[in-house]
Image (spheres, rainbow, N blue to C red):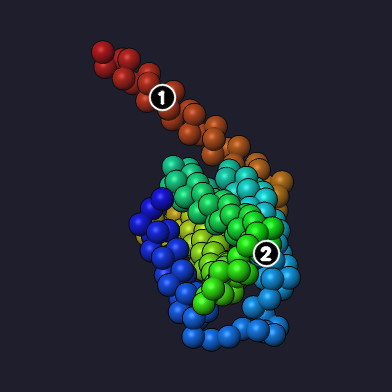
C-alpha cells in the first residue's frame, strides 16, 4: 500500500467517524444502504467500461505516436491507476456486502452507529476514487494530445523552400501524394546507395 492510498483511507475513516458521531443520518435519502450500494455498483460498472474504452483508444493511436517509449510509459501508468481504482470500488462493494450480512451484529454495538460509519466511508471513498479516475483520464488525454499534435514548423527550423514543399504537398490529392512519397523514398534510397558506394571507394 502506497503512502498516498494510506493517507486517503485514513482521511476517509477520520471524516466518516466525525460525521457519524456528530450527525444523525436516520431517514437520510443519500446515506442509505441501498442508495450507497447502487451508487458504488454503478461507479464500478462505469469504471470497467472506462478501462475497456481506454485500452481500445490506446491500441488505436499507438501506431500514430512517434515516441513509443514515452507513450507506453504514460499509458501504462494511467491504466494501472484506473485499474487500481476499479479494484478499490470492488473492495467497497465487498465491504458493503459484508456489512449487510453482519448488520444484526453491527447494530448491537452500543453508543456508536457503525453502519452509518461504513456507509459514509464507502460513499466518501468512492467519490475520491472517481475523482482519481477522472484525473487519470485527463492526464491521458493531455498526453495523447501532446504526442499527436502536429509539430510546429518553427521547431523544425524549416527553410522557405521546405515550407513551400510542405504547403504544396497539402494541396495534392491522395494519388499524387502517394506518388510524391514513393518518389521521395526512391530518391532517399538512391542517396543511401550512392553514399555507401562513395564510402566503399574511399576505402
Labels 2 and 1: the sequence-earlier one: 2
> Is 128 placed above or below 177 here?
below
Residue nearer the viewer, 43 or 181: 43
In the rendered image, residue 49, in percent from the top left (x then y), is placed at 70, 56
Q: Which residue is mark 1?
A: 194
Residue nearer the viewer, 39 or 105: 105
Q: Nearer the viewer, mark 2 or mark 1?
A: 2
> Is 17 placed above or below 93 here?
below
Among the 4 quarters of the image, the one containing residue 113: bottom right
Q: Residues within 10 Å of mark 2 (few under 14, many from 20)?
A: few
- The residue at 49%/29% (across/down) is 189
Residue 172 visible, this orientation: no
In the rendered image, residue 74, in percent from the top left (x then y), is placed at 46, 51
Residue 14 visible, this orientation: yes
> Is 101 placed above or below 15 here?
above
State yes or no: discs 2 and 1 in contact (Cβ < 8 Å). no
Report whether 53 appears left or right of 109.
right
In the rendered image, residue 192, in percent from the top left (x then y), is placed at 43, 27
In the rendered image, residue 89, in percent from the top left (x then y), is placed at 60, 58
Report whether 1 appears left or right of 100.
left
- The residue at 63%/62% (across/down) is 105
Residue nearer the viewer, 55 or 150: 55
Residue nearer the viewer, 24 or 52: 24
Q: CA distance from mark 2 to mark 1?
A: 86 Å
Q: Which residue is mark 2?
A: 104
Question: Callout 1: helix, strand or loop?
Answer: helix
Among the 4 quarters of the image, the one containing residue 39: bottom right
Quadrant in the picture for the C terminus: top left
- The residue at 71%/46% (across/down) is 175
- The residue at 43%/30% (across/down) is 191
Question: Callout 2: helix, strand or loop?
Answer: helix
Among the 4 quarters of the image, the one containing residue 106: bottom right
Amino acid at each position: 500500500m502506497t503512502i498516498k492510498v494510506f493517507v486517503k483511507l485514513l482521511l476517509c475513516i477520520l471524516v466518516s467517524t466525525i460525521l457519524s458521531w456528530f450527525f444523525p443520518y436516520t431517514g437520510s435519502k443519500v446515506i442509505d444502504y441501498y442508495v450507497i450500494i447502487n451508487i458504488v455498483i454503478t461507479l464500478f460498472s462505469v469504471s470497467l467500461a472506462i478501462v475497456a474504452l481506454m485500452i481500445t483508444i490506446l491500441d488505436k493511436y499507438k501506431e500514430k505516436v512517434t515516441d513509443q517509449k514515452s507513450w507506453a510509459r504514460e499509458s501504462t501508468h494511467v491504466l494501472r491507476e484506473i485499474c487500481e481504482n476499479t479494484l478499490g470500488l470492488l473492495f467497497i462493494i465487498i465491504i458493503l456486502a459484508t456489512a449487510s450480512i453482519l448488520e444484526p451484529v453491527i447494530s448491537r454495538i452500543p453508543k456508536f452507529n457503525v453502519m452509518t460509519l461504513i456507509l459514509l466511508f464507502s460513499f466518501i471513498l468512492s467519490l475520491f476514487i472517481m475523482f482519481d479516475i477522472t484525473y487519470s483520464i485527463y492526464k491521458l488525454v493531455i498526453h495523447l494530445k501532446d504526442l499527436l499534435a502536429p509539430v510546429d514548423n518553427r521547431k523544425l527550423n524549416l527553410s522557405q523552400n521546405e515550407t513551400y514543399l510542405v504547403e504544396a504537398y497539402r494541396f495534392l490529392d491522395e494519388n499524387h501524394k502517394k506518388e510524391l512519397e514513393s518518389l521521395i523514398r526512391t530518391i532517399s534510397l538512391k542517396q543511401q546507395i550512392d553514399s555507401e558506394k562513395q564510402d566503399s571507394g574511399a576505402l
